[in-house]
Amino acid sequence: MKRIFFITALLFLIGFSGMIYGQVVAKFSSKTDSAGRARSMMKLAQSSIDYYTKTFTYKGLKPEAKVRMHLERSGAYVILKKFDKAIDDCTAAILINPKSGEAYATRGNIYNKIYKDEPAIADYRKAIQYITTTEDKAQLYNLIARSYINTREYDKAVSADSMAIVLNPKFARAYASRAEAYGRLGKFQLAINDLLPAMYGFQDNARALSVLLMQRADMKRALKQYKESINDYSLALKLNPDNGLAYWNRAASYRQNGDYQLAYEDYSKAISYFKNDRMQLARLYDDRALMEVGLQQYQQAIADDSVAISLDTAYRVAYYNKANARAQNGEYTRSNAEFKKTIPYYMNNPLAMTSIYSSMAHNEYFLNNYQTAIDYCTKAIALNTVDWSPYFERGRAYLKMNNKDLAVNDFKEILARDTSKQSADYAFSLYYTGNADKAVEVMQSSFLKTNDTFVLMGDYYNMACLYAIMNKPGEANNFLKKCIDGGYNKKYALTDGDFDNIRNTAEFKNIMGVR
């Protein structure tokens, strides 16, 4: 029997693949100044500081002039990144005129720039009390929302952006910001609804539209609308072909739609955009490795996960996936050596450890080390997680050691635990507890539930195993041929004890290419 770890056992490890919810409203069209221009600006800023400092010594300056000069000097200090002095100037302006909305707003912007969101919010709210224009108030509410997003107070961000939109119904940045907050709250359809008016406001800015389309695609992907999300990512890339994040996220949609080759190609394109970020690059190589597993390209997957580990030695997922790729390739001893490397990273994660011990038991079963397989399963079961796989692996090992009663007890445990009643483990447990017809029915029903080639080939393989242990060589070889013709690994099948009943048939030998 084949365990399809790639699809079913990695959720606790890989999370939601791809990157999501990029900040889309912060300075869409900002450009990096050249070094020469930056030097000129700094020189001009220092000159401004010197001028205003000298001017403050003049007698007879009116209060409104002093407020303006403090704010102008504050801006110059910001250019020089002397933020404390910039804040001091804003505070001085407020002491002169406690009703200066501009002074509060300026100080709020400085706090925002140095990631002090709470004082920024307080200043923005003060500014709203004294600023009279509707559009400026809307801008301030949007800035408050951005600060709440930074502090992960997404409900408050939604409320602030909603106020901005009430004040200015065409405020594109507020729609985009509220969409991000909705996305963070898991309210994906509401986010999608906001992104359309956001796009209207940036229809003349191709790069901004690209980011907004990518954000909408993220939301659709979260709603499992994979084809629709792929369309939006493609539109984003048409507007900005250098949007590396869109390639990455489109790859994730292709992957979840079962289009492994297209996902592989997009991961490969994304890699070129993250060459200077070792941690993200490690994740991309690992993501591509998963596609190579789906394409039955196990050696390439092993190579890519090796690169991922070299880029980020603490990236534990790559160790697990490399171990799994070796198992899929029939390298059971080396696979367990890799799994052992993952253990220090997951010692405090019972669900992960259950999967690791079950995987190692699976490998030991194929190596005919049945007692070792039982020992690993017993360790997994002692962790008391919801995963039933260690019961299945232990039950099979007990059968090989002629402990039928213990085996049946484990298979009954699976029948009780798997409430979906649809897994391959469930089907095999039905067979081992005397319900062969129902076992076949469960396996057959799985063929109709997926368009994912990798999963379908795994289902064909498991069906072949089931018919083989039922001693039905014709049916077993028929399903085995389907999965081998689909690119399945012969090395794995040749070492699978489930095929012992049909191993000497001419058709099996022909399928496997052995004499």
Image: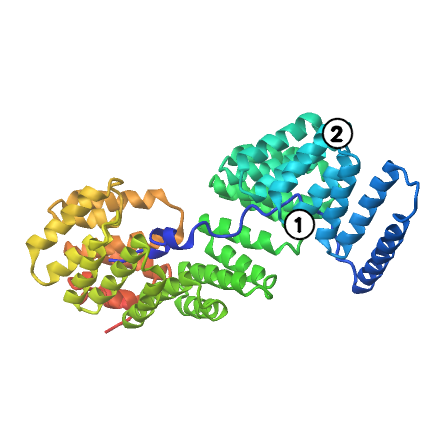
Q: Is residue 279 left or right of residue 439?
A: right
Q: Earlier in the sequence, mark 2 or mark 1?
A: 2
Q: What residue is at 77 percent from the left and 53 percent from the top?
A: 77
Q: What residue is at 43 percent from the left and 66 percent from the top?
A: 301
- The answer to which of 132 and 426 lies nearer the viewer is 132
Pointer 1 residue? 238
Pointer 2 local density, CA inside 10 Å: few below 14, some 14–19, many at least 20: some
Q: Nearer the viewer, mark 2 or mark 1?
A: 2
Q: Which mark is residue 130?
A: 2
Q: Are marks 2 and 1 in contact (CB under 8 Å)?
A: no
CA–CA distance between discs 2 and 1?
44 Å
Residue furthest top as drawn: 166
Q: Which mark is residue 268?
A: none
User: Whole-percent x and y of residue 277?
Assistant: 57, 63
Pointer 1 local density, CA inside 10 Å: few below 14, some 14–19, many at least 20: few
User: Whole-percent x and y of residue 320?
Assistant: 37, 62
Q: Disc 2 residue type?
A: Tyr
Q: Is residue 476 left or right of residue 296?
A: left
